[in-house]
Image (cartoon, rainbow, N blue to C red):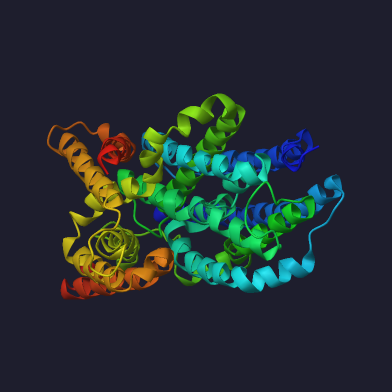
Amino acid sequence: MSNEEKQALFESYNKRTHLLGRVASVITLVLLVGVPFVIGGYLGTAPDLAAVGSGFLAIGLIWLVSSVAEWLVYTPMLGAGGGYLAFITGNLINMKIPCAINARDIVGVKAGTPENEIISTLSIATSSLVTILVLALGVLLLIPLQPVLQAPALAPAFDNVVPALFGAMAYKYFRRNLDIAVLPLAVMSLLFIFVPKLISSTSFMILPSGALAILLAWLKYKKAGGAAK
Amino acid sequence: MSILSQLNSSFLYIVCGGIILFIALVSLFFLIRAYRAGKAMGIDTTKMKRVITASATFTLLPSIGILLGVIALSGSLGIPWPWLRLSVIGALHYETQVATAAAEQAGLGGLSASTMTAGGFVTICLLMSLCIMWGMVLSTLFNKRYLRRIGSGRVQASGGPGFGDRTMTAMFIGLISAYLGSYIGGLVSGEGLLRFRGDWLPLAVALAASLAMAFFVWLSEKKKLAWVESFSIAGSMLLAMASAVLLGGIR
């Protein structure tokens, strides 16, 4: 298949992906915002809108800023289909992003290409389905599973899922990009050491850390003579 | 009827389960559609199947972690709502924070079944939805324009990776650095500036995962066991989590 044919096929697929993604997102939004009212109707009450308003001003604005940052950073990584699905199903940092990046690496596709769009969508959709299945089975078996999953001996394992994930990913990425990784890791470590309050805002610190890594990657790219290398 | 019985009623299971089913169908639809489009575009189906297998194994362990989030929240919010939240849009690392803050804003003093009321519960539900829905709102409104602007979806001639590709890798390195830095900071200053009395377990677990990953990479590259790659992240995480159990005992 020529590149032109491939591009035409992909564009028609992508156009429909945007339409379907938007429709699915809007339906999900309506369901998520509507369901508290439906549950309220069943329980004979309604959400306290004044408390919701003041609560949103107090805590929602922080998540709004965080969501804007997440959307700006992760959308190019995920592409259209993966992006819509990931923002619908959530758990981006601790699951969907590493999952999509891992999938991309396994098959060796480049970000921003039609292949990446397909691989990213396959990866995010599979990940979402597995999570939904595990949670559904877990909820079904909640009573027999609870003593096992909540056993004090296993608590350190489940408390450290994210360090286990990022430790594994660190080896995979740092070993080929040590010159890009050293400085952000050093700067972040020093920041968290001298301003330990920032530890509770790690998700916000991804932005400066990522910006520094991108700057270093750009300098390396320029030094190597751009795309020719 | 106690508040928890109401929050665990069949009605709530049906409502929340119905929405989860809808999301599962959307995911399945996107999966099949992408697979067919990939096949039509000439992408190797073996590669696509490998992506599906790797993503499924990759997701298994973090999903069990998320299930624990459902269990943790179920004591105060019942099972159906946390099940919905963590299957759709929610995120393990901030769901509890938002629920707690929402409970305070709803005037309940905190997240507890003893103080929970029906009115408080639905207020918390609405606030939780409004706080975390913005990624979805932004993607609905701007994804198409944003992706077009950054030139995503162009067929590239073969050759070395462009800067766009390197940007994604660099951003991901930045993400990992931020988290590893937070574990180092937590150990050194988590219990007071430069006191080295903080929690060392996350850093030790990350190190164990790196070592396990190095072993899997060695198997894959030096012993030519390419199939290992699909399971390397899940396997490294499993070994690191097992080490957390052992190390947790001596902490």
Compare residues A62 and B71 and report the one nearer the observer.
B71
What percent of the width, then of the height, locates residue A130? 51, 36
What percent of the width, then of the height, locates residue B50? 37, 35
Give the farthest residue toward the front. B114
Position above or below: B151 against A140: below
Residue B246, picture quadrant: top left
Give the farthest residue toward the left. B222
Residue drawn at 32 percent across, 63 percent down = B178
Compare residues A183 and B35 and report the one nearer the observer.
A183
Compare residues A22 and B18 and report the one nearer the observer.
B18
Q: Is residue A70 left or right of residue A140?
A: left
Residue B129 can be seen, yes or no:
yes
Residue drawn at 50 percent across, 28 percent down = A147
Position above or below: B237 against B178: above
Residue A202, picture quadrant: bottom left
What percent of the width, then of the height, locates residue B16? 70, 42
Q: How many marks?
A: 0
The quarter in which the C terminus of chain A is drawn is: bottom left
Residue A30, picture quadrant: bottom right
Q: Is residue B53 left or right of residue B11?
A: left
What percent of the width, then of the height, locates residue A96? 45, 50
